[in-house]
Image: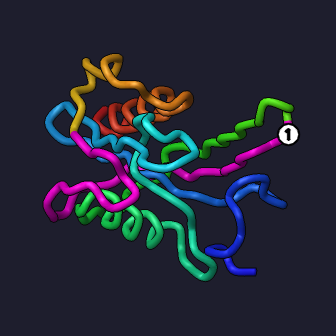
Amino acid sequence: MSLKEESREYPARPLLGVGALIFADGKVLLIERGQEPLKGWWTLPGGLVETGERLESAVRREVLEETGLQVRPVESAAIFERIMPDIEGRTQFHYVIVDYICELMGGSLKPGSDVANARWVALDKLNTVKMAPGTPPVIERALEILEGAKA
C-alpha cells in the first residue's frame, strides 16, 4: 500500500512529516488548514514526506504546493509529535514532524488547494489567530535559534 493509499486516520505507525518556519520582517508564514486533521486551525506550512524523498526536498515541495513560495531549508529547529486521540482514546492521527527554519527564495504567496488561507502573521499578533496546539512553542524555539545565531 503506498502512502497515498494509506489512511492518515488510525495509522499502523506514526507518519513522518515536515514543517517550515519562514520569517520575514517580524512576521511568520502560517497556513489555515483546509482539511482534517486540524481543519480551520493555523499551522506551519508542511506535510508528509514521500517514500524516497529527502526531508529537505519534502520541505521545499510542501511549501511550494501549499503557499506558492520557494524556500531553502537552513536548519532543523524542532522535532514535534502530534498525537490526536479520538473520543474513545484511540490514536486517530499520529505524526512525527521535523520543522525546518527556511530562507525565502521567491514565488508569490497563494494558498494551495488543500489550504484554506495563507498569510504572514506579525510575531506580536500570533495570539490573534487560532493556532494549532504545539505550533507556538515551535515558533518560539526557532526564534531562539535565530537569536543565538546572531549572538
What residue is drawn where x is 45% and y is 55%? 46
Give the residues in magenta: 90-119
Where residue 143 sits, quadrant-wise, is: top left
Instruction: Using residue 72 as the reference point, say whether residue 33 is left or right of it.
Output: right
Judge whether residue 79 is colored magenta. Answer: no
In front of the other: 144 or 104: 104
Q: In the picture shown, does residue 115 fall above or below 86?
A: below
Where residue 32 sits, quadrant-wise, is: top left
What residue is drawn where x is 50% and y is 31%? 132
Q: Amino acid at mark 1?
A: Arg
What residue is drawn where x is 33% and y is 47%? 116
> Are there few (<14), some (14-19), or many (20+) residues within 10 Å of tag 1?
few
Dot 1: what SS? loop
In front of the other: 126 or 4: 4
In front of the other: 50 or 129: 129
Task: Identify the residue under disc 1.
Answer: 90
Instruction: Using residue 140 as the reference point, say whether residue 49 is left or right of it.
Output: right
For the stretch drawn in magenta, the main secondary structure is strand
Give the color scheme: rainbow, by chain, secondary structure or one colour: rainbow
What residue is drawn where x is 15% and y is 64%? 107
